[in-house]
Amino acid sequence: MGFLPIGDDNSMRQSTPVVVYLLIAANVAVYVLQVLLGEPFTNGFSTVPYEITHDVDLVGVQHIRDAGHVLSIYLYPGPVPIYLTLLTSMFMHGSPMHIIGNMLYLWIFGDQIEDLIGKFRFIVFYLCCGLVASLAQIAGDPNSLIPNLGASGAIAGVLGAYLVKYPTNGVQVIVMRTLMTLPAFLVLGSWFALQVFEQISSRFAQAQGGVAYMAHIGGFIAGVVLVFVFSGLRTTPLGATRQDDGPGSGWR
């Protein structure tokens, strides 16, 4: 069953999620650059697993075998050193729907994690989750020539953190055109289970596909672990007190 989250109960939030807003703005700005600069920028600054594992910046036509078919892709010069693509690719996206979906998840689930661990720590947490996500994807296919890009690995870390810190928090979702409220553990647990299923399915099909499921899985697990490193056992910010402003006041 597919869930489309549209909001959550954030009545415990004590601060404005400035970092979440800045991350959304940065992702949008980079996507505008992608549109303006085209394929040379997108393919040059995305993470290509082969480039990372072999410390080389590939330039020119590359041939990819996928499910019995041979596809061609042109790679362009990237940053120096090439390992910087592990960072730049976190802010790049492949389509309007790709960035809209990622930013929606970041907007809904990121604010309470930022509030919990603090703004500077949230930046470090987010980037660490994104880095682990990329490394997980590379480990799954170290010789792949397919450029990887997107904030979904880092955002998966946010989802993992949210799951373990706020498992019973209400999340508003659309299911088969019906609006309902479900606990976070069901919404996010189902999302993670789907990523694992799709990764296993793609392996059996021997198809590389267009979704970096290993990045999602790696980022999610990183978030589950790292949120305890950054927050300990707390589920509310230090010094926070709950304010009850009436039914539903925490929904957005």
Image: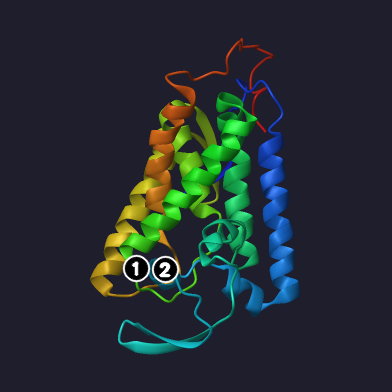
Q: Is residue 77 above or below residue 163?
A: below
What secondary structure is marked by label 1? loop
Q: Residue at x 38, y 73 (%)?
A: 144
* Among the 4 quarters of the image, the one containing residue 13: top right
Residue 222 % position (x, y)? 40, 42
Query: Is 107 placed left or right of 170 in the picture?
Result: right
Residue position marked by numbered label 1 in the rendering:
142
Q: Which residue appears farthest toward the left when viewing the image?
A: 204
Residue position marked by numbered label 2 in the rendering:
49
Crowd band around label 2 with a 10 angstrom C-alpha radius: few (<14), some (14–19), many (20+): many
Q: Residue at x 48, y 24 (%)?
A: 231
Contact? badges 1 and 2 (CB < 8 Å) = yes
Residue 242 % position (x, y)? 61, 11
Q: Give, as a three-letter code, the residue at label 2.
A: Pro
Q: Is residue 214 visible?
A: no
Crowd band around label 1 with a 10 angstrom C-alpha radius: few (<14), some (14–19), many (20+): some
